[in-house]
Image: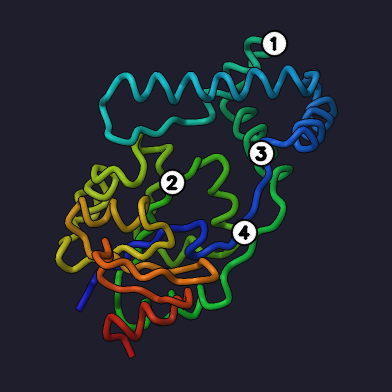
Amino acid sequence: MYQNYIFDLYGTLIDIHTDEYSKNFYKKYAKWLRKQGYFFEWKLFYRLYTSLEKQYRDNAMQEGRQIKPEICVDDVFRDVFEIKGYKVSDEEILHLCENFRRISLIYMCLFPDTITCLDGLKKAGKKIYLLSNAQRSFTWTELEQTGLVPYFDGILISSDEGCMKPDPEFYNICCERYGLDKSQSVMIGNELKSDMAGAKAAGIDGFYINRAPVFHKDAAPVYRYVSENGSLMEVLTQTGID
C-alpha cells in the first residue's frame, strides 16, 4: 500500500530521557567545562544558555518565515562562549554540544521492536525516512550509536531545515527532496500534535504509536492507523506487510 515510511525518532524508535534544566546537570556540565579549560560558574552558564536560547526562538517566531520555526543550538553555544570571551571553532562547538547532551543523558535505548520493524520494511523493499525535531549536534551521535543510520534512505533533522513538526513545510521538504508521492507515504510517530496533526496538514497518512499507559480513543482522530499498545510491529501488519 505504501512505498515510503517516514519515522519520528525519539519516543518512536528510541526511548530516551534527558535532564537539561536541573541545577545538578548544570553543575556537572560546568565541572566538565573547567576540565576543558572553559571557566563558567554554573549559574552564569545556565542563565546565558536559557536566555539566549529563548531569544533565538522568539526571534525566529517574530520573523514569521515558518509556521513552526526551529533554531540551531550551535549558534546559542557560540554566543554563550563569546560573551565569556572564548572564541570557539565549529569543531569545538560540536564537541561542547555533544558533551552537553552526553552529560544530560539519563538513559537511551532502542525500543525492543525497532530493529525488527525496520528490517521488515527493508526486506519488503520499502523506503525509510527520518523526520526528527532535534538538534544535529545532539542527535547524530545517538543515531550512530544505536545503529540506525544505515536503515534510512533520507534523514531530516529540524535544526538543519529551520522548521519543525507540526509545520507542514517540514514534511513538504522531505517529500520534495526525495521525490516522495504523498499518497504512497505514511508518517509513524508517537506524538498526536507534532507527528500526526502535522502529517495530516501536509496531506500524509498518519500511524500513531501510542506509548502512553492508556489509550484514549478520539472520535475524530487525526491519524489513519493506530497501535494502541505501542507496537511498531503493527506498522507492518496494518499496512499490509507480512
Check disc 3 and report the residue beneath it.
Answer: 20
Check disc 2 and report the residue beneath it.
Answer: 133
**Mark 1 vs mark 3, CA separation in Å:** 21 Å
- SS state under label 1: loop
Task: Give x and y (percent) for residue 136.
Answer: 50, 42
Front of the two marks 2 and 3: 3
- SS state under label 4: helix
- SS state under label 3: loop
Quarter holding residue 82? top right
**Mark 4 vs mark 2, CA separation in Å:** 18 Å
Quarter holding residue 199? bottom left
- The amino acid marked with disc number 4 is Gln
- SS state under label 2: loop
Query: Which quadrant of the rendered structure holds the N terminus?
Result: bottom left
Check disc 1 and report the residue beneath it.
Answer: 84
Check disc 4 and report the residue beneath it.
Answer: 145
| Towards the viewer: 57 or 35 | 57
Estimate how packed mark 1 is, as few (under 14), some (14 to 19) or many (20 or more) residues with alpha carbons within 10 Å. some
